[in-house]
Every structure is written in structure tokens, then in C-alpha cells.
Image (spheres, rainbow, N blue to C red):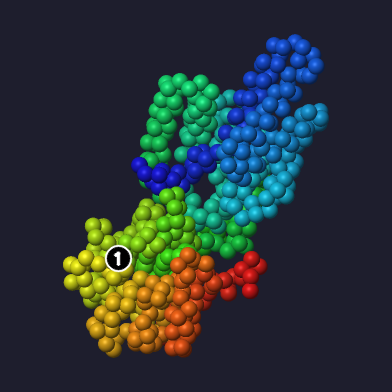
Amino acid sequence: MTKGDLWTTFNRTGTTHLMSISGLHVTMVAAMAGWLVSFAWRRRSALALRWPAQKAGLLAGCLAALVYALLAGFAVPAQRTLYMLLVAGLAMLSGRIVAASRILALALLVVVLLDPWAVLAAGFWLSFGAVGALLYVGSAPAGEGRGWRDRLRAWGVVQWAATLASLPVLLLVFQQFSLVSPLANALAIPVVSFVVTPLALLAAVLPWWPILALAHQVLACLMAFLAWCAGWPVWAAPAPPVWAAAAAGLGVAVCLLPRGLPGRWLGGMLLVPAVFWPVDRPASGEAWVTVLDVGQGLAAVVRTREHTLIYDPGPLYSAESDAGQRVVVPYLRAQGIARVDTLMVTHSDTDHSGGAASVLSALSVERISSSIAGSRGERCVAGQRWVWDGVGFEVLHPAADAYAAETRPNHLSCVLRVEAGGRRMLLTSDIEAPDEAALLARYPDGLVADIALVPHHGSKTSSTPAFVKAVGAGQAIIPVGYRNRFGHPKPEVVGRYEASGARLWRTDRDGALRAVLNREGASISAWRQEHRRYWHGR
């Protein structure tokens, strides 16, 4: 199982929090350190007479929590736990009794004061929201039963509260919710927290291989169970508006009210808009082409009424990150799209193909078209045509005989033309001057387009005067990274398009760009113009 498959399993089962440094892990380290110091302190009568062992252990636990949180990367969940432990520790040292809700509020204040940008992280809302929900449920009147049924019921209430509290955030940020999460967490939380993590920490102190072997075996059995759970369906919905997510949060609070209070069913009604938010679709005979802002590379999504095509999944950023994982998949999920009809990987350069593995891992892809030798799927060849929902698609390049020649990947770039309502858009990937000449020879009168994707990010190796004139686009989109090391787009290329009368759009300046093709015309809208933020500058 690859790393991507592992995280897919964790996401689909809602157990990602257990496989990272969670608050429970920080608390366990603090408890172990505090117990050890307190145990040793009591055996030193001189120390115990000067200062109580309980307070010495408390300070040791807080120090251990700080060190462990720093080693773990100091993420929001670790910060929240650390600050809560520090506040609780200070209260105990002062002899005061502080309510848990106040401790959580003070921890929230410290996190926001030290890192105001933390509110933009999903972990901030998930972490504080889950703990707040548990405190909210725990504050309700409860019976005094101590039997196994009462304990099982209490455990179920905790699971229900944590699951329901995360629902609005998960739908708003990730657009999906694991239906099997309560079942998976019911087993995974105690196994990871009380077996795997203690064994791993013990092995760090006592490096004896049977300890790690036992931890590995237990985790392997758990992973088999999680892999089975991951096959269960996941609820997916488009990203709801903020007001719908806020209403869902209020609905969660109502649903978690104590049993017996009237009107709890109204909370479920408040959840409906977020859970069942409708998918926004093009009309029949209309095409939406979105060129995503993925930096120096290319990723575009073409949508018709019932179909979706990805034209390049974007660049590979590092061994740990790519545009498919960071941009393409989140965008499609936000649009309510879980199935892709065609993934077209135009050529092998990693600024165009680097996100393919992430897309294939996260989404259901029916067909793959590519010019990469030995890749899955079929070759893209000039002359291929199909129609989706009244929208025509045609591959214009490369010709079949081009695959026989040894040539650079750019020369095999798949060129796609999309036509809807009599309007055309030309997607050109990284073709260069020889390929443009071949297209002009093959389609002497058929390259005219209303919108053009500028070849090769505006490189001087492409966009020859003859090609720009033949296409005659009224609008042109340059997919380019901000201050990229290649100096794209080149000034002479920009001047060439401006001289032709085309209006230029750039992903580094305008963000994601959506082109709409229909009978009314061909228009482009820019994300940064419609969703202006102060950090975008002028």
C-alpha cells in the first residue's frame, strides 16, 4: 500500500487525526512524564519536604508536553492541547478550580493571539470544535449508572458528538464525510491511543525490538480493518456556502441537547442545506473550461452538463505534494464531482503530468488519454472526436505518425478543441513552433477560436506570428507561475497577442479562470476579481 493509498484509507474512515500527532498523544506523553517524576520525587524525602511531588510532576508533565509538541511540528491540535494543559496546570498550582470550558476558551485565545492565521486551517475548527462538543455533551445532566451498559451508552454519546460536530467543517472544507467514521473510530481510537502509541513511546525509551514488533503487528491488524471500512461509501456534496455551514453548526448544537428536551428534531432540519447542497452544472450545449492556478504548470477542467474532462492534472511540487492533491481534487470535490469521464495527460513533463497519480487515487476515472509511452489508457491522436451533451471535442495534435519519431515530449502534446454553441476554445498544452506549423498545414482554415490557451506558458519557442493570426482569438489565457524561473510569459509573445487584439488573462495575476462557451458568446471570469482579498494587492 502506497503512502497515497494510506492517506486515502485514513480519509475515507475519518481516522486521519489518529495517525498524526493528536491532542491525546500529547496528553499521554505529559501524563507519563508527570507520573515518572512524581514517583521518583516521593522517594526523595528531602525533595518531597521542600515541594509536593504532585506539583513537581505537574511541572514535568507540562514541560514534556511542550517538548513533544515542538518535536511534532507544533500543529494546531498539539497547540490546543498544550495550552489547555498549561492553563489547567497553572490553575492546579494556584489551588483554584477552573471549569473545563474556561480552559478551552483560554487555550483558544492563546492560539489566536500567537497565530492569527490558524483560523484558516481546517485543523483549528476540527480540533476546538470536537473538544467543545465533548464538553457540551458532558455538561448535560447524566444518570449515575456505572454498569457496562451505561458506559457503553456514554461511549456512544461521545462518538456521536465528535462525529456530528465535525460534519459542518468537513463538508465546508473537504466536501465529504465518512459514513463509517463512527465504526472505524470506535475501534481505532482505543487501539491507537492505548496500545500502539504507548508501545511506540516505550520503544523510544527502551529500544527493544519485540516492543516495536508488537506495535507493528497490532497496527497491521487495525489497518486491515480500516481497509475494509474504506470500501464503504463516503458522503460527498458540493462545498456549501458559509451561511449553510453556520446553520449546520447551530443544528449540531440543537441535536446534541439532552434527551427529553422538545424540538431537537429542528437541528436536523438545519443540517439539510449543508448536507444536500445542489451541484451547479452547465446547461445542455454549454461548456465550462476552468484553467486552475497551479503555479508553473497546467491543469484545466472541462465540464458539460453530465461529463467532466481533466486536461492535465498539474505539476509535481515535491515528493510529498502535487497539484492533483492540492488543487485539482479539492476543486472537483468543491464542485460536487466525484467521477471523471476522461483524464487527458498531454505529455510527460512533470509540470503537466505530476498530479496524475493523486487524481487517479482520489477520483473515479473512466478513461485516460495520453501521449506518454507505456502509460495507462489510450493514445491521443489527431482526428479523435466525440460529443458530450451537445458539446463537441476534437483532438488536433499529434498525428499518428508522430509517435514513430524520437522527439521531445513537447512535440507530442495533445491539442484539444472544445466547441459549444458555435464558440470554440483551443487548448494547446506545450506545443512549439514546428507543431504549430504542422497544425497550420493540417487545418489551414480550421484553427479559428474565440479563446486560446497560450502554448507553452508564453515561451518564445511557441506562439509564432502565423499561428497567432490563424487562431485569431479574442481572448487568450496564459497558465503561468508567479515570478517563475523561466521568465514566462516572454515580452515578445505578450506583445504578439496584444497586437492581434486579444485580451490577455494570466493565472499568476488573475487566479483560476473560467471560460464559458454557449450560444450567447464566449466569456471569461477571474477568481481573484470575483473573490477579492486584501492580500491580492492591486
Eyeballing the image, is 340 above or below 25? below
Identify the residue at horizontal 36%, vertical 75% (top origin).
461
Eyeballing the image, is 28 above or below 508? above
Quadrant assignment for the C terminus: bottom right
Quadrant assignment for the N terminus: top left
Q: Tell me where residue 45 appears, x and y as whole percent.
A: 75, 10
For label 1, the crowd category at 10 Å Cα-Cα, with few meaning under 14, some 14 to 19 and many 20 or more, is some
| Residue 182 appears in the picture as rendered | no
Identify the residue at horizontal 61%, vertical 42% (top origin).
74
Identify the residue at horizontal 52%, vertical 40% (top origin).
20
Residue that label 1 marks:
409
Answer with left or right where residue 236 lies relative to residue 399: right
15, 54: nearer the viewer: 54
Query: On the image, which quarter does residue 90 sit in?
Result: top right
Does dot 1 land on a helix, a strand or a loop? helix
Query: On the image, which quarter does residue 456 sit in?
Result: bottom left
Which amino acid does the dot numbered 1 rest on?
Pro
| Residue 376 appears in the picture as rendered | yes
51, 88: nearer the viewer: 51
